[in-house]
Image (cartoon, rainbow, N blue to C red):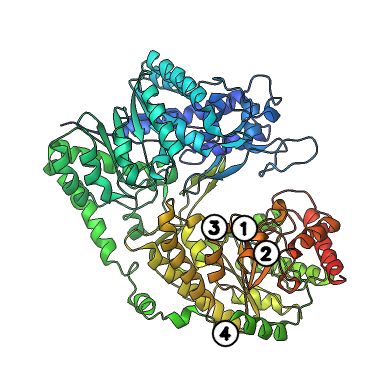
Amino acid sequence: MTITVATLGFPRIGPRRELKHALEAHWAGKIGEAELLDAASGLRTAAWARQKALGADWLPSNDFSLYDHVLDTSVMLGAIPERYRSADGEAGLATYFAMARGTTGDDHGACSHGSVTACEMTKWFDTNYHYLVPELVAGQKLALNRLKIVDEYREAKAQRYETRPVLLGPVTWLSLAKGRGVDPFDYLDEVLGLYSVILGHLAQVGAEWVQIDEPVLVLDLDDKQRRALTRAYARLSRSGPKLMLTTYFGGLGENLSFAAALPVAGLHVDLVRAPEQLDAVLKAAPKSLLLSLGVIDGRNVWLADLDALLARIEPIAATRDLVLAPSCSLLHVPVDLALEKKLDPEVTQWLAFAVQKIEELALLKRALNNGRGSVAGELAEASQAAASRKASPQVHNPQVRERVAGVTAAMEARQSEIGVRTAAQAAVLGLPAFPTTTIGSFPQTGEVRNARARFNRGELDAAAYEAFLREETERTIAWQEEIGLDMLVHGEFERNDMVQYFGEQLSGFAFTINGWVQSYGSRCVRPPILFGDVSRPKPMTVAWWRYAQSLTEKPVKGMLTGPVTILNWSFVRDDQPRAESCRQIALAIRDEVTDLEAAGCKAIQIDEAALREGLTLRRKDWAGYLDWAVAAFRLSAAGVGDATQIHTHMCYSEFNDILPAIGAMEADVISIETARSQMELLEGFAAYRYPGAIGPGVYDIHAPRVPGEAEMVSLMRLAQAHLRPEQLWVNPDCGLKTRNWAEVKPAIEGMVAAARTLRAG
Ligand code: GLN
Ligand code: ZN
């Protein structure tokens, strides 16, 4: 039987973030449209050449995007909200970027006079990739616009690459869309009409197959979505090319028999997230359906266990044709491990980035087509690397294991209940009503980033860098004191990133130089790689806290990133459950918390910005995740006495469905994002009778706009409608690192004035 290799999609940003540089140069007016498009086409050509050379048989096209593939789909269908239509006459690049970024040039597309805000952006399933949410309004006119998918297919063909165009499926697109006054699914038939036309075009220019992505098939579907899928594929299967219906990020579950019965020519399934579905898939899929097995992890960076995979696939390969593929597009992993010259060689041999993953697939193919003997050397090398990982003392630290095994329920519980703690803390802290504070960071100015860059390049020595940071901290403390904030922060000037800063000081983490992954548009992140048992060789933040506290009589908060957030923003080892890794991090943070307390710190904030995004895609799995995530937070926090105040911060506003879990974290004070939502989400906290204190953000730090005192007072009055006054703190929505001092100073001064007004009654 024939075995082939597909990639489903290759990273768009380029091995050295060439796309980012070209985009940003274009936005800054340094290069024109033609030059940007040239750079993009160069990246596509390089990606095809690379994948082909690595042994991929099915090359993707239209996996490239200048910003986001969901936005591309919306533009293709003409779902362009009226407010962007003026950016250029014909829905060209200016319109596209206006939708992506707004027209102020601000990263968050924040609005100022006469400008347009960007489309809403949110996370793509459970990844850290963000897409632009499609918008549909009543009376929306849809019409095919830019046939990028056809253009890119032809572009490849002109270079003699036969590709399988990637098309976001209509039901996933509609499911992600927001209707304003309409149900997006009202547009189903119209959308299907347009999809038919596109598929017809693709057939005409020679595309034999199209990869049509319907990741919604791994979610809990409602009847409307099912009916839409049935209707969609009955129609689209008659439109020309053969369809490879592509599912990923989980198992098909109860949608399997339904999906396997759709009239498509092929089905791709994710066997990394859901290896257990293989047997059921084989049973459900008729031989006439070409199966694409997602056997290599498209979401993580580890070498695969090729021997084990071969043992599973060999018997299947004897009976039917197969495509071997990554579980999902390679968009979510860095490009090429070979660019990592500074990574510990021992760790490096355990890893695979996009390029290496295609090599693994090609190796599997050769083993299946020509027998394992034909690739014996490579297989032996891979199993040697796997064996070294299993045995490495860098990965396995018996002391950490022992400590984790010794965790008791008592270690996860504060000494007394919230009422007792609140009284003890009040006695120590002596704060006024409506205490004011900030979330931790102050502006990371060009100067701060510059000093860090020079220090990293060796141009600034450690003493000079430290002196610079001390000065920044000192000035920030003095200013906070002067304007009358009640609980101060040191400003986080020494931190490059809230996760990396801790990862670099913990053992068990590695950091790449070029391991960038697209987060949104030109924005890329370099997630730490959590490869081994985690421990904390020495205190990480105590010296900075101590220095800051030495400058003032006011309490200075200790500032930490929580275990769940460190976990969720890293590539996590796959040789033990995530819960286990999280617990190890929690113990390390716990050590830091108790060290801060011992140093005299009275209030410690443990940020859990990423707790919610770790939620599993299927609701039935939520409780399992929340159980261990909340337990990890509690373990990190509960080593302190009643009089030490534990804060946490979460910068998002969808709380209602996880409020019991938030309550179970038992933080004394939680600060949340509310400035844009008129305190609505406090209703949920009130209904749930949330017992702790809450700082509902009154300053939207995502926009350059400075809120006035009166506005912040009225937001707090809204908050008082839901909560007891003694429960309320006054603070911004999030950290201030992305803002500048010219905005921050008046905003925070106004906030302090607002608190005084509230105290006056
Ligand atoms: N303490 C961090 C800061 O102030 C929190 C950032 C976040 O929640 N994203 O920057
Ligand atoms: Zn935040």
Res. 314 image quadrant:
top left
Q: Residue sitting at 52 percent across and 81 percent down?
A: 639
Question: Where does label 1 land, which residue?
Answer: 651
Please state which amino acid type lies under the numbered disc 4. Ser
Cα separation, mark 2 vs mark 4, equals 26 Å
Counting from the top left corner in percent of width and height, residue 484 is at 82, 71
| Mark 2: secondary structure | loop
Mark 1 crowd level (few <14, some 14–19, many ≥20, 10 Å Cα): many
Mark 2 crowd level (few <14, some 14–19, many ≥20, 10 Å Cα): many
Please state which amino acid type lies under the numbered disc 2. Ile
Res. 85 image quadrant:
top right
Ligand 1 shown in quarter: bottom right
Quadrant in which the N terminus appears:
top left
Cα separation, mark 3 vs mark 2, equals 24 Å
The answer to whether residue 755 of the structure is visible from this angle is yes
Counting from the top left corner in percent of width and height, residue 493 is at 66, 63
Cα separation, mark 4 vs mark 1, equals 28 Å
Residue 657 is labelled as 3
| Mark 1: secondary structure | loop
Whether the residues at callouts 3 and 1 have beta carbons within 8 Å, the answer is no
Question: Where does label 2 land, which residue?
Answer: 439
Question: Where does label 4 land, which residue?
Answer: 416
Q: Nearer the viewer, residue 586 or 660?
A: 660
Please state which amino acid type lies under the numbered disc 3. Asp
Cα separation, mark 3 vs mark 4, equals 27 Å
